[in-house]
Image: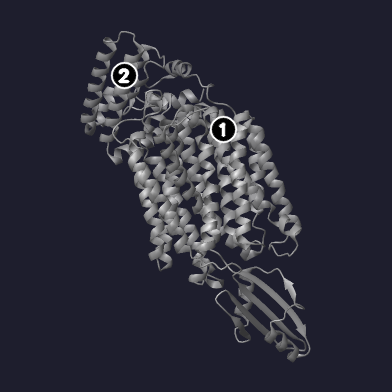
Amino acid sequence: MVKLSKKELLIFTALFLIMGTLGVAYSCVPFIFYRPTVTYLETSEVDVNLINKYNQNLDFDSYQKKPYSELHVCDILAQYPQETKIIKQTDYETIYSILTPNEVTTNKVIKFTYNEKLESITKKFNLTCENKIQQTYMQGAGFSGQIIGAIISLFLRFSHQQLKYIYTILSLVLGLDLIAFQFAESVYSITILLTIWNCIIVYFMSNVNYFCNNMFPDQFAKYAAALLNSSWGVCFVLFIFISLYLPNYQDNLTIVGIQCIISFVILLTQLDFKNESKFGEQNIDSKPQNSSLVSQLSQITNPLIQRNSVLSQVNPIEVPEPVYENFIQNDQQQNQKEQTNTSIQQNDCQKQGEDYEQQQQQQDGNDDNNKNQQKNFSQQQNNQQQKIGIMEQIRLVYIEFYDSLIEMKCNPDLIQTTIVWVLSYSTAMVAYAMCNLILDQLEGNLYMNSIVFSSLELVGGLLSGFIVYLGWNLKTTLQINFLLQGVIYALTVFFFGTQVSSDNFAEILKSIAPILIAKLSFELVWTLLMTYLRDLMRSNHQLFVVAISQLFSKISITIVPFYIFFAEYIGINKFSLLIVLCLCCGYMTKNYKITKNNFDFNKNVKNQKQVNKNPNNKTESFIEMCNL
């Protein structure tokens, strides 16, 4: 059993609170955008006085209830503006009556009812009927912040030491952003705050595994993802109880913001901003984060970082000396012509090389001295990274991104595994987002439904940790999960209507079955994918794949609010899209292959030497090598 120090425990608690706050960003959507339940009733009577009596007494027991969507009901109101009359209006309910006299008088009764006493954004700005599209725009714009966060995490990645500052600042910004909802009195200001919130979500999640792996012992870091993921359910249950006593969305989000401020204080007082983590000596290869994405193949082909990679990885990679000399000479010729603006960085690299050579000459074989030399060199490399400008760093990451694609071309199994991983991750995120967007429209109590669903998230997180402990096969687990989801969604489409409306508990349970499965499977899939990523591929591909999946899934999530609006508009089942995605994932999961140890770098270097027709064009040579 791993024991954490008091400081490590406090840091993990702060990360737990922040992760929980980020999870609330998804789960609070049914509360802060709580919509009224729309009920359509209709009857036909010969005696108009009898209908007037029904309306006066609000007695609609004899009326026929029809499962019309909100947009359909709003179209009916728009068709009969002269015949429409409001027979009851309170803060939480509005009842319309439409009389269409003919041979038989038809009375259409439409109810807009807020079953829960929640002061939501929808209620405050009356985002119903023709204004419903504004809510769709707000949700889509808010989710677009996740695309921004994914792009930032893809092109701006930092070392563990720099992430200490970034995480501390993000916790403060997130807290102030949530508190600022108290002062937002327009749709546009709320949209901006939602966008910032979602942007922080993705950047934090994209780097939290890397941060934990370098902050905590390896035995604890292995389960950190599952433990942090369980914070989503825990903190959301806390948010539900806060909403019971503070029904106004501005007040309950302020409480969540204070939770982030507490995390900021913990990180500010407990993190060591001067020294690297004590586990840095054991994980030199994973720092800085920029170099973790560079494959062994691209470290030779990339002239801007080749010198650092040769000095830092000359021991673990055995490559023939003539090959290194050949590439070094070619790099020097190319750098003299094209990289005139990087002379200062090259001089620093040469200084580091000279210092490193002196350390190697003085090495006496003592293990402790070797560790000290590696630690000093890692600190020098981090200092060099901090000197690189933002634009230069973006350019380097772009080159690393391109080189990773080149190496994937050399390894078809890696391409298949990456595609399936990205699709699996994106499908889970789309299902989770869709369920949160329609949760407030389900029959039953919103608080009870939310607690049950959050409990399922917690169960899913614990179940995934148990599966990791037992060492179950990832391929089989994911196949069963996605195929089961697809079948349940298909049953929903073919055996249930497009609207959930029933007073029978069994029918309600059947109707919310897709939500139950989506909530449970999201925690399971997310944790399993993140935990087993180190087994599926080498570490220099992991951040690349996670960044790509984050970007692709966030683009998909941004489209979900518009898809739901479109599905309601044309009257199709909202889960139709998930049927295709889940069954596709279940079928493609068979293409999962372990690519961690099946790529022989030295062998490909020899092949490259044989097919190298133009030594001055290394990229073309390696592409030709991949085509063999």
Q: Quadrant of residue 60?
A: bottom right
14 vs 595, left or right, is left
User: Which element is circle 1 on?
Assistant: helix
Nearer to us in this view, 79 or 272:
272
Q: Is residue 181 visible?
A: yes
- Residue 166 place in picture, x, y as percent: 35, 42
Determine the residue positioned at 39% across, 44% down: 152
Which amino acid type is marked by label 1? Thr
Nearer to us in this view, 311 or 15:
15
Q: Residues within 10 Å of mark 2 (few under 14, many from 20)?
A: few
Q: Residue furthest top?
A: 364
Mark linked to residue 236: none
The residue where tag 2 is placed is: 372
The residue where tag 1 is placed is: 417
Nearer to us in this view, 465 or 405:
465
Q: Quadrant of residue 213?
A: top left
- Residue 383 place in picture, x, y as percent: 27, 31
- Residue 116 place in picture, x, y as percent: 59, 67
Q: Earlier in the sequence, mark 1 or mark 2?
A: 2
Q: Is residue 412 visible?
A: no
Q: How is the image coloured?
A: one colour
Q: Is residue 247 above or below residue 64?
A: above
571 vs 151, left or right, is right
Determine the residue positioned at 54% across, 68% down: 132
Which amino acid type is marked by label 2? Asn
Determine the residue positioned at 41% across, 62% down: 181
- Residue 4 place in picture, x, y as percent: 45, 31
Q: Is residue 603 above or below residue 583?
A: above
